Image (cartoon, rainbow, N blue to C red):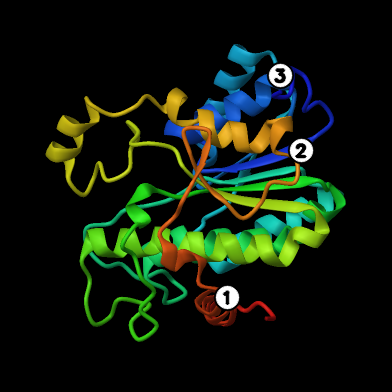
Amino acid sequence: MEREAGALAGRVAIVTGPTSGIGTEIARGLARQGGSVVLACRNPEKGAAVREDLIRTTGNVHMSVETVDLASLVSIRDFARRFRESHRALHVLVNNAGIFLRHRHATADGMENVFMVNVLAPSLLTNLLLEPLRAGAPSRVVNVSSAAHRGGRVDFEDLQREKSYRSFRVYTDSKFALNVLTFEMARRWRPDHVSVNAVHPGVIRTQLGRHEYPGVAEVFRLFFKSPAKGADTPLYLATSADLNGTTGAYWANRRMVPSDPGANDEALARRLWDVSSRLVGLET
C-alpha cells in the first residue's frame, strides 16, 4: 500500500532540478503528500515561480527554494552545509537533475560538465547529506537514471573526455556510472536504513537536449511521456510503504528490472567510488 495523502507530514524532502519536467512533478507529488519540500535549483527566480505554482495546486505552503549549482563543488558544499544547519533530519532525497551536452564543456573546477552534473554532483550531495539521512532513517534516496545507461562503461583513462567526446556516449556512460554508484551507496548504507535506488522514468517530454538538438528534440517530444507520468515511478520509490527497506535496485514502471549487468560489478564500484571521492574532495 502506498502512503496516504498527508503521510509525509513532518517529513523533509529535497528535489534537485525541480524547475521543469519531472522534477517539478516529483516536487508536486511530494507536496501533495504533505512533505516539507526543498526545491534545490540553480535559478532562484524560476524556483520561486515553481514554488508559487506548487502552493497553488497542492495547498502545501511548506516549501522552500534553495540555490545550488550542481556544476560547482563549492556551491554543492555550501547548499549541504546550509541544509545541515537548518534541518536535523532528511527523509527523501531525489537526485533528479541531469544534463545532456552536444559538445564538451569544463566546469570551473575543471570537470567535464556532464560527468560532473550527472555523476559527481549526486554522489557528493548524497554523501554530504548522509548525517541528516541517517537521522531521518528509514530514509530514501532516489537517483533518476535512464535506460540509456545500457551498454555504458567507465573509462578511467578519460573520465574528463579530454581525448574523445561523443555526446550520446558521454550521456550513456554518465547514467551507467550513476547506477554503479547507486548500488555502491546501497551496499554501504544498508545498515543505516538509508535506501538508495535508481530509476528509469521513461522517455519524457523534458527540456533535456533542447538546446543541443532543437529540431530533433521537438519532433520526438511529441511521442514521449508527460512529465507527470514520468514522475510516477520516482514518487513510488520515494513514498510507497511497500518498499520499506528495499534498496540497491533499478526500477522502471513501478517494477524492479535488471540494470546493465556491468553496473553490479562491485570491484568497479569500489574503484569508481574511490576515484570520484578523490575528485570531489571526499574521504574514501
The image position of residue 276, as x and y in percent, is 53, 76
Left/right of residue 192 with respect to residue 3 in the rendered view: right
Comparing 271 with 76, the one in front is: 271
Q: Which label's residue is closer to the chain start, 1 or 2? A: 2
The image position of residue 157, as x and y in percent, is 35, 86
The image position of residue 198, as x and y in percent, is 53, 50
Q: In this view, does 61 lie above or below 230?
A: above
Left/right of residue 220 with respect to residue 260 in the rendered view: left
Quadrant in which the C terminus appears: bottom right
Q: Can residue 10 be seen in this view?
A: yes
Residue under the point 76% across and 43% down: 91
**Amino acid type, residue under disc 3 in the picture:** Asn
Residue position for label 1: 273
Q: What element carries label 3?
A: loop
Q: Quadrant of residue 187?
A: bottom right
Extreme-left residue of the structure = 215
Residue under the point 51% across and 66% down: 264
Extreme-bottom residue of the structure = 157
Residue position for label 2: 12
Quadrant in which the N terminus appears: top right
Q: Which label's residue is closer to the chain start, 3 or 2? A: 2
* Count of picture labels: 3
Residue position for label 3: 60
